[in-house]
Amino acid sequence: MSTTLERRLAKECQDCEQTSYNLHPYNGAGLTHLEASLPIPPGTAYSGGTYTIDIQGEIAPGALGSWDPTHTIKSALDKIVKLLQQPDSRYPLNEEADSQFKEIQSLFRERAQEWAVKYAGAPSTETDSASYGGYNRNVIDPFVSLRYDKEAVVKAFEYVGIDRNNGEDYTPEEAYQGDILARLSDA
């Protein structure tokens, strides 16, 4: 005979079968320790990937709201997907990503998509390198992290005559860095 908890969890798992979520016991454990795969729809920062989460413990204090008997596994998974689609700065798990989300949306979206490719199996896109004007992102991003617009940084690199170095990572000479910053300050 199963307990009330086991019956409820079995029912909630069954309810999730009608969704795009793949829910199953973690490493063969019972229903009290689950793993879920969550596909994220296109058009969002983390799109294209499938995120696998270990359902045990909290995501972030307060992120899912206070527990209520009417909350279900499905409602918790729906909230997680919503947070991946539209992050909520009240519950940041990664301070750097939260800062980018609030202040430099374009950089946040690019990094999130990069993580989606690396950690969630999202397809990579070729538009990323094009948006850096052929420069390696690691050459451009230090200036973007100083709150300059990426397109303005690329234009400053072109104006100063910085070599694209075939898209390879390198550090421009200090004198060039000063020229780039001067150009960005004038813009």
Image (cartoon, rainbow, N blue to C red):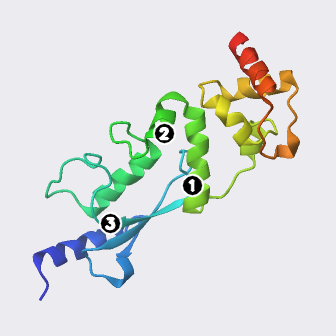
Badge 1, how many Cα within 10 Å: few under 14, some, many 20+? many
Name the residue nearer the viewer: 155 or 19.
155
Badge 1 element: helix
Q: To which residue does mark 3 refer? A: 55
Q: To which residue does mark 2 refer? A: 96
Q: What's the amino acid at mark 2?
A: Glu
Nearer the N terminus, badge 3 or badge 1? 3
Badge 3 element: strand
Residue 131 in sight: yes
Q: To which residue does mark 1 refer? A: 116
Q: What's the amino acid at mark 3?
A: Ile
User: CB of mark 2 within 8 Å of CB of mark 3?
Assistant: no
Q: Is residue 141 above or below residue 8?
A: above
Residue 9 falls in image quadrant:
bottom left
Residue 174 falls in image quadrant:
top right
Q: Measure how far apart labels 1 and 2 are at the Cα level.
A: 17 Å
Residue under the point 27% across and 49% down: 64
- The N terminus lies in which quarter of the figure? bottom left
Q: Measure how far apart labels 3 and 1 are at the Cα level.
A: 20 Å
Name the residue nearer the viewer: 101 or 164.
164
Badge 2, how many Cα within 10 Å: few under 14, some, many 20+? few
Residue under the point 65% across and 58% down: 123
